[in-house]
Image (cartoon, helix red, strand yellow):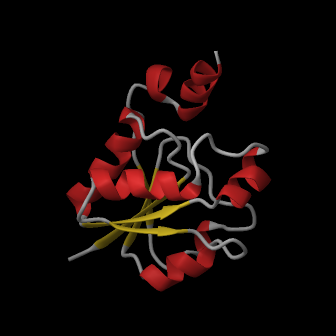
């Protein structure tokens, strides 16, 4: 069966995240790389509200058949190459990590459409949780 990889921070797992993960499951075996706290800080300029372990566990508890791992603290591609995905599924607004291009990836990518981005975009969720 096809291995479908999804990567991200997944802070406070919300319906937008669920949509992405469910779309991946429709295409094959779900594999997830959860971003390390230090990488989120480096890329986004702030740490997630939940720890990397809390975020990993939330996905494992919700998707018990998924293969969920933490990202590599130094090399974004290492866990991707370890998983050997057949497809990488990207969220509608998701960017590849700094220094990584589609040419570096071992398989094709597909971008899914948005699921109610005006309500479930992570940055909106994070802003609301700070109020």
Left or right of 24? Residue 49 is right
Image point (43%, 41%), residue name: 13
Q: Quadrant of the C terminus?
A: top right
Image point (56%, 51%), residue name: 9
Image point (42%, 82%), residue name: 84
- From this view, report whether residue 68 is shown above or below residue 89: below
Nearest to the observer: residue 78 or residue 86: 78
Residue 107 x/y as whole percent: 45, 75
Residue 95 x/y as whole percent: 62, 51
Left or right of 17? Residue 74 is right
Image point (73%, 45%), residue name: 44
- Can see residue 104? no
- From this view, report whether residue 74 is shown above or below residue 27: below
Q: Quadrant of the N terminus?
A: bottom left
- From this view, report whether residue 116 is shown above or below residue 122: above
Nearest to the observer: residue 110 or residue 79: 79
How many numbered marks appear?
Answer: 0
Residue 33 x/y as whole percent: 49, 65
Residue 88 x/y as whole percent: 43, 65
- Can see residue 75? yes
């Amino acid at each position: 069966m096809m291995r479908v990889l999804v990567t991200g921070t997944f802070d406070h797992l919300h319906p937008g995240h669920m949509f992405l993960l469910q779309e991946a499951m429709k295409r094959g075996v779900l594999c997830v790389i959860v971003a390390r706290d230090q990488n989120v800080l480096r890329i986004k300029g702030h740490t997630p509200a939940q720890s990397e372990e809390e975020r990993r566990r939330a996905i494992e508890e919700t998707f018990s058949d998924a293969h969920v791992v933490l990202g590599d603290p130094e090399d974004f591609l290492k866990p991707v190459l370890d998983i050997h995905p057949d497809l990488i599924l990207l969220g509608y607004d998701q960017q590849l990590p700094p220094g990584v291009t589609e040419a570096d990836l071992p398989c094709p990518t597909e971008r899914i459409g948005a699921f109610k981005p005006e309500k479930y975009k992570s940055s909106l969720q994070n802003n609301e949780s700070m109020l």
